[in-house]
Image: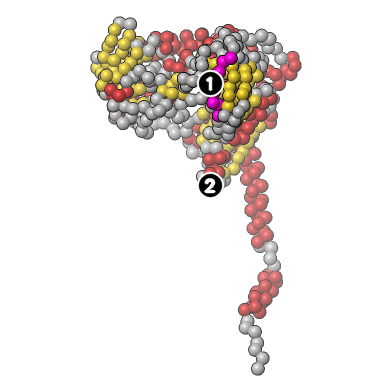
Amino acid sequence: MKYDIVIIGSGPAGHKAAIAASKLGKRVAIIERNFRGMGGVCLHKGTIPSKTMREAILYLTGYRHRDVYSKWYRRKRRITMQDLRLKLADVAEHELEIIHDQLERNGVEIFIGEAQFVSPHEVAVDGETGRKILYGDHILVATGTKPSRPPHIPFDGKTIFDSDEIIDLKEIPRSMIVVGGGVIGIEYAIMFATLGVEVTVLDGREHLLEFCDREIIDALIHHARSLGMVFRMGEEVVGIERFSDTMAAVQTESGKRLVADSVLYTVGRVGDADELNFQAAGLEPDERGRLWCNEEHQTWVPHIYGAGDIVGFPALASVSMEQGRRVVCNAFNEPFEAFDLMPYGLFTIPEISMVGKTEQQLTEEHIPYEVGAARYREIARGQISGDRDGMLKILFHRETLKILGIHAIGESATEIVHIGQTVMSLDGTIEYFRNAVFNYPTMAECYKVAAFDAFEKMSLDRLFEESQLTKANTDSPAETEAEEVNQAELDEPEAVEV
């Protein structure tokens, strides 16, 4: 069976690539392990489940109303894992129907079964109806990743578990140790801390989420500690063991032993392609099972592409979708236009989002910048919603006023960041936010407040420059003349007595 492109994996990258190729009139095949798995890890184990669970926690705990109604806010007193999963099945089923419908309407042929390369152009699919060999002029590997599970860790899915297993827990534990302070680990850690779970985060790095703005992360840590969370940074874990049906211990290299009801292990992810037989295609994944690709997402076998989490950083669903589209456009010589500015969204509590560069990066690159900031407590909508700790930062060039970065933490951070992203993409300046009119009261008003803050700082800087200029010109002509005379006397040779 011959196709213009064969796509392995139906997550964000594979799904969008299949539709893009079909829109170009190409014959497309997409392979997925099982029908219920359409949508990939994003839909069933990762992005959608975790964000749905987060929303359930915010609703059931009354988190958003605590500061609005103080002690009178209402919440469900006993929250169970079943409560957190209540909406998940509905969301997943709805999204699954949409994906399947889109693929069918666009004429994409769906094959269910395990995929395996048999040659650089051929992929075998072992399904319920036997083995089929698909030939592709082009092949896209978009199989995503899975949690790293070192063999020495006794995972049982109950006391010691990974991020794929956490949504299937029977009960909410009283205490939890999170090994790994990356995005996934921190998101789940703060979710469970919001539920009242005693959470300790262990990470071998000295700083949390180093790719984010330091001030934003400091604000996140401050909030997390107010929930009772404990952070132990710079701690390497050397062992995890279960010593009863409901307890586990974590041993660190420094000699510490931490005990809790549960351990969530979230140290890295690896490519989910163990059975693909890459060698038959002339490919060799790295030590973490990921594929190397160039900027056009080609592997070193030119007609085989990689997209999504299996190619590594940044491993975002939004970016994976664009990578899928880029692969199709490159494969079939179609123009591809997309902005390079990709926003990041961390669905912690509170949520974090950013686009562009951080203060650390600008400092290291010796770029003269200034910061305009707005605190949610200064915004009417922030007071109404009860979020007084959130903030928005605009980083801009001191001379050109061009926007260099947007960083936000708090309610709607992952939404309002797109305003800054748009202005940056259009090469806009901080002046746009000063002059623009925003709906009132909204969180978007933060941009205007931050712009006013920026220009206030710039005006103070100009006052300093003017004072320096004035100081340089304050010397009187008489003083200048006297200085010239004194200098002339110094320059004259001394008289020699005869």
Position of 189 with respect to 122 (left or right) is: right
Question: Relative to the observer, which residue lies in front, 206 or 443?
Answer: 206
Q: Name the residue: 51% across, 16% down.
A: 154
Q: Is residue 139 magenta?
A: no
Q: In the image, residue 298 lies at what x, y percent?
A: 33, 30
Q: Nearer the viewer, mark 1 or mark 2?
A: 1
Q: In the image, residue 114 lies at what x, y percent?
A: 34, 13
List the residue tagged with mark 1: 265
Q: In the image, residue 83 lies at what x, y percent?
A: 59, 8
As measured in the structure, the alpha-carbon distance from the residue carrying label 1 to the one carrying label 2 is 38 Å
List the residue tagged with mark 2: 366
Q: In the figure, 334 relative to 99: above or below?
A: below
Of the image marks 1 and 2, the number of the one nearer the N terminus: 1
Q: Name the residue: 64% across, 44% down.
A: 457
Quarter the C terminus occupies: bottom right
Q: Residues within 10 Å of mark 1 (few under 14, many from 20)?
A: many
Q: Name the residue: 70% across, 19% down.
A: 66
- Residue 81, image quadrant: top right
Q: Which residues are magenta?
A: 236-243
Q: Name the residue: 47% across, 33% down.
A: 341
